[in-house]
Image (cartoon, grey):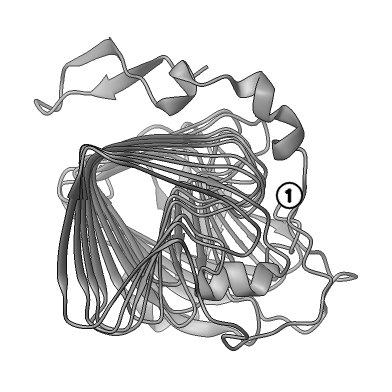
Amino acid sequence: MFVSWFILALCGVCSATVTLKDPADYTDLHADASDNSFKAIYDITPVMYQAWAIVGPYMFAGENHTSLDHETFTVNKNDTSVIVASGGAETNISFSKIIKYGYSSNLFQASFFGSNAAINIANTSTLYIDHSNITTHNGAANVYAFGTGTTAYVSNSDLYSSGPTAHGLYAAGNATIWGYNVRHYSGGNRCSSFAGDSPGGYVHVYDSIAHTKGIGSAIFYALGQAYGTDIVGWAENSPILFMDGNQLAVFNNVDLTAGLLAGTVMFSSAVRQSNASLSFANSRLTTTGKDMPGLWFGNVIASASLYATEISTVSGILVVANYSQVTQEFDYFAGYPDNNDLAPAIVAVSVAESTLNGDLVAYNSSSVTWNLSNHSSWTGSAYSGYGAAEFAVSLDKTSAWTLTHDTKLQNFTNEDSSMMNVKSGGFTLFYNASSVANKWLKGAVHKLSDGGFVKPM
């Protein structure tokens, strides 16, 4: 059960254990065990357009304003929503219950068009829902929004779902969802708490709690833009973030824990894309598996920013860059036999006001650039997991690096030319003497203060 969390205090130096609750704490999870055992199977013919009308027993269309409060809305039917708003409708729901039963006959229709969601709004419509409980079973999203100009505001509400692809807040087609003080639990397979899908959706979540149980069920799925502020989340069998392609994810003051694959997974599902961007500020990211890195990148060109952020891993690995991607099963990374039409990951990570412990690992011609600034400290090394790899490390005068193993760098820059901010522990830092960035080292051997060396390769 999801009962307590170790929270980062805003003061930056204090911490405390507090008890938080999500909808799993007051729901009969055993009753939904069978429902949650179903997998999201995508070996069907894709239907990537809206193949049938979105319908439900409570439909609001046109530029009408409807207010509903202290009511219960429910339906038990396949491929059917409970509440549908379209064509510029504005719907206000307060202090109510929305309950959905019924399966989806086509996961592409459910995923991309919300054909089985409890609440479906589209075509420049607006939804306001507060102090409500949205419960779905059999694989139905809680709130789905589609289309440019479509916006949903969900506040002070509980979201619970069982079954596959039963996402919490789900935006697609350039729609926007704003969540405030939302408590979400999903027990099924591939059920993200807060998700954007193709075409990209925009999801903003504040002051919320998220907990997922199933494989592939991330806290955030970014295909578009995802923003999380003051979020506590636990993905028991997933990274906290999946990002596909050149998307954006911004997290501030979050405490997120991942239980499978990696803390975050950024990849391109087809041709390698560039400009993917991830940032954490005043946050903590935790991974619980013995082989899980904090940040994982595959078949993508990406940047990440860490400001006053802690990454805690059992594996001792902070970053992995690879010629790879995540599979449709969302439970392992694709190797060369799975897909040989990929490209190496090219990753740049900027670290400020942070103390980090762990290694950088690159595979199959991938590269990692690691920049430390603003009183940051790093204890770790960089190495190739398999095949060729390139690493670049830079330090400003206020930052420090403690080596834990011999390390080879393509580029090494340091504002402190005396290199007193590098503690070698007796290990050697090798650099490429032919690189223009290393010209300041003059191709020479430099002895470090604690017995190690900086040497040309």
Q: Residue at 70% x, 55% y: name it.
A: 330
Where in the figure is residue 149, as x and y percent of width and height? 23, 82
The residue lying at 56 percent from left, 51 percent from top is: 166
On screen, residue 135 above or below 278: above
Along the horizontal axis of the image, is 1 left or right of 124? Answer: right
Q: What is the residue that sits farthest to the left in this orientation?
A: 11
Q: Nearer the viewer, residue 276 or 363?
A: 276
Residue 206, image x, y percentages = 20, 46
Corner quadrant of residue 325: bottom right
Q: Is residue 335 left or right of residue 205?
A: right
Side of 447 where 262 appears, left or right = right
In the current view of this chain or complex, which residue is farthest to the front? 57
The total of numbered circles placed on residues is 1
Residue 133 percent location from the top left of the image: 34, 37
The C terminus lies in which quarter of the figure? Answer: bottom right
Residue 231: tell me if it is visible. Answer: no
In the image, is 171 to the left or to the right of 53?
Answer: left
**Amino acid type shown at disc 1:** Asp
Q: Secondary structure at mark 1?
A: loop
Q: Residue furthest right?
A: 337
Which residue is denoted by mark 1 in the rendering?
A: 331
Residue drawn at x 69%, y 71% as measured from the top left:
323
Q: Nearer the viewer, residue 202 or 102?
A: 102
